[in-house]
Image (cartoon, rainbow, N blue to C red):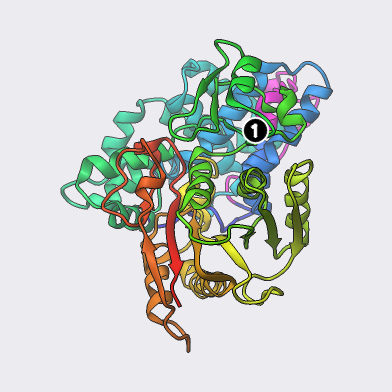
């Protein structure tokens, strides 16, 4: 199961037409389908993800907002719609394998909209507590609304076959045994492309238990974590605002507060004012570790060389302001640079936001004391938040990222003064995007680059209290071990 077979639409597959409004089978009057706003919204979100390569975390909020404004769409409706969208996307590979076992044609010959309705139905049957009859009937009604009565019959037949077994029963039928093919077994059971399973396993090391825990963690809904930006807000303020049952302190970051499920960050004054924000705890740890790395001499100028959309930049700016330092936040894409400006607005210390290419920087070499480059990457460390990314990425994508990642790190090491510190971060645990990139730059591999004289700094003491950080000097965080995105951080000190 290397890829999702959903990208080859066949307009004829499963096709049907709407019947005459005044006639029905056997002379029965035609009954109009019932429109379920929750499932229609979920279907629209899945179509946007499929047709436009959109991300659910960007598509879903405006759809929910519009539904609420239209009335008759409450908090429970929003929660169900969110679960249907994210649950279906996370388990898409597993559901595709089950659907394929219930039809008499290759999956690629079924229209993508039909597959989306089937996957939504499969998730309700196998991944929620919705009763079987309700899951089938609601999915068939959805199919009648968005596909027509002809294809609704096809949906009904397939879902009735799926309802014959629970999830465990289906996995026994469609997943190869672990002994015969461990990676393909894990790919089907935990709904990841096979190549992603292999890459994560290589990065994680160890036996079966660890990789299963990681893959399962990728399929869980992540907590919403807030950051109290130093000098502007405190964790106590956020906890007080959330109330006793609404929030918990962060696990590792001194600036983190975890929200209870269903909480709305935008309802908090500190978030609306920009004094606090939504930021994964792993991201907070990366910024704090760079800020706290030991440094001799001046500590006046900091650079975030890949600042969009602004979470780490906002925390770095607040930390810099507390020491009398200034932050330059640089982002190549102008629209993302505007997001950074919004995130930094109101910071008490000096800062500047520019739109610039970090591989062709406008600043002079040796200009900064601390530099962070959180480089563009495959995003395999954030599959909890962007489950659709696992189906879009291909192994060859990493070949395209590698030259950019090396170039950004080389320029970051050039931008920092001798004795200054550079943090290389990425939201991916893939070895080709983490340790290999750093080794390539330090040893002059890749292109015509010369070796860079820099020494490793052990990151582990800069993340006090965080367990399971490995042998160092770099650090890889993990969803199943730390409850964070799979962030990687290497710290380097320029020596010549």
Question: Where residue 383 sits in the image (x, y, percent)?
Answer: 48, 45
Q: Residue furthest top?
A: 244
At a point 45% along the width and 49% down the height, the residue shown is: 487
At a point 37% along the width and 79% down the height, the residue shown is: 443
The segment highlighted magenta reads 13-42
Q: Which residue is mark 1?
A: 42
Asked if residue 144 shows in the view, the reply is no
At a point 22% along the width and 52% down the height, the residue shown is: 181
Instruction: Using the image, determine if residue 388 lies above or below residue 32.
Output: below
Give yes or no for residue 32 being in the magenta stretch.
yes
Instruction: Using the image, determine if residue 354 lies above or below residue 216.
Output: below
Tally of numbered tags: 1
Question: Where residue 157 sits in the image (x, y, percent)?
Answer: 49, 32
Question: In this view of the protein, which residue sits in the foreground, 246 or 73?
Answer: 246
* Residue 100 relative to residue 469: left or right: right
Report helix, strand or loop for mark 1: helix
Question: In this view of the protein, which residue sits in the foreground, 50 or 34?
Answer: 50
Question: In this view of the protein, which residue sits in the foreground, 72 or 60?
Answer: 60
């Amino acid at each position: 199961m290397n890829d999702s077979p959903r990208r080859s639409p066949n307009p004829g597959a499963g096709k049907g037409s709407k019947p005459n409004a005044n006639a029905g089978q056997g002379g029965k009057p035609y009954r109009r389908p019932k429109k379920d706003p929750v499932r229609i919204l979920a279907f629209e979100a899945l179509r946007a993800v499929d047709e436009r390569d959109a991300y659910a975390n960007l598509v879903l909020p405006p759809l929910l907002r519009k539904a609420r404004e239209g009335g008759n769409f409450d908090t429970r409706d929003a929660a169900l719609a969110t679960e249907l969208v994210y649950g279906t996307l996370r388990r898409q590979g597993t559901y595709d394998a089950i659907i394929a076992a219930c039809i008499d044609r290759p999956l690629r010959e079924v229209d993508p909209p039909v597959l989306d309705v089937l996957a939504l139905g499969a998730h309700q049957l196998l991944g929620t507590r919705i009763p079987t009859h309700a899951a089938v009937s609601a999915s068939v009604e959805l199919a009648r609304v968005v596909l027509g009565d002809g294809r609704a019959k096809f949906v009904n037949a397939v879902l009735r076959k799926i309802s014959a077994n629970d999830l465990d029963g289906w996995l026994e039928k469609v997943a190869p045994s672990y002994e015969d093919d461990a990676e393909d077994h894990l790919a089907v059971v935990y709904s990841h492309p096979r190549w992603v399973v292999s890459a994560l396993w290589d990065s994680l090391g160890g036996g079966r238990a660890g990789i299963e825990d990681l893959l399962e963690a990728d399929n869980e809904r992540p907590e919403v974590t807030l950051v109290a930006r130093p000098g502007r807000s405190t964790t106590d303020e956020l906890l007080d605002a959330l109330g006793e049952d609404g929030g918990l302190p962060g696990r590792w970051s001194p600036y983190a507060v975890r929200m209870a499920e269903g909480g709305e960050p935008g309802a908090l004054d500190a978030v609306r004012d920009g004094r606090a924000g939504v930021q994964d705890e792993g991201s907070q740890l990366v910024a704090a570790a760079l800020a706290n790395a030991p440094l001799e001499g001046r500590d006046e100028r900091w650079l975030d060389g890949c600042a969009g959309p602004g979470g780490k930049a906002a925390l770095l700016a607040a930390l810099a302001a507390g020491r009398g330092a200034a932050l330059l936040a640089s982002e190549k894409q102008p629209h993302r640079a505007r997001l950074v400006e919004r995130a930094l607005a109101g910071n008490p210390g000096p800062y500047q936001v520019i739109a610039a290419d970090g591989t062709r920087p406008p600043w002079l070499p040796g200009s900064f004391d601390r530099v962070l480059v959180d480089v563009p990457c495959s995003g395999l460390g954030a599959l909890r938040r962007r489950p659709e990314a696992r189906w879009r990425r291909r192994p060859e994508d990493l070949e395209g990222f590698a030259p950019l990642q090396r170039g950004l790190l080389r320029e970051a090491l050039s931008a920092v003064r001798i004795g200054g510190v550079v943090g290389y971060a990425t939201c991916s645990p893939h070895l080709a995007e983490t340790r290999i990139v750093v080794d390539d730059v330090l040893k002059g591999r890749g292109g015509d680059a010369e070796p860079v004289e820099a020494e490793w700094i052990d990151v582990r003491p800069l993340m006090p209290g965080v367990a399971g950080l490995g042998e160092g000097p770099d650090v890889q965080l993990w969803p199943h071990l730390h409850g964070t995105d799979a962030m990687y951080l290497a710290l380097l000190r320029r020596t010549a």
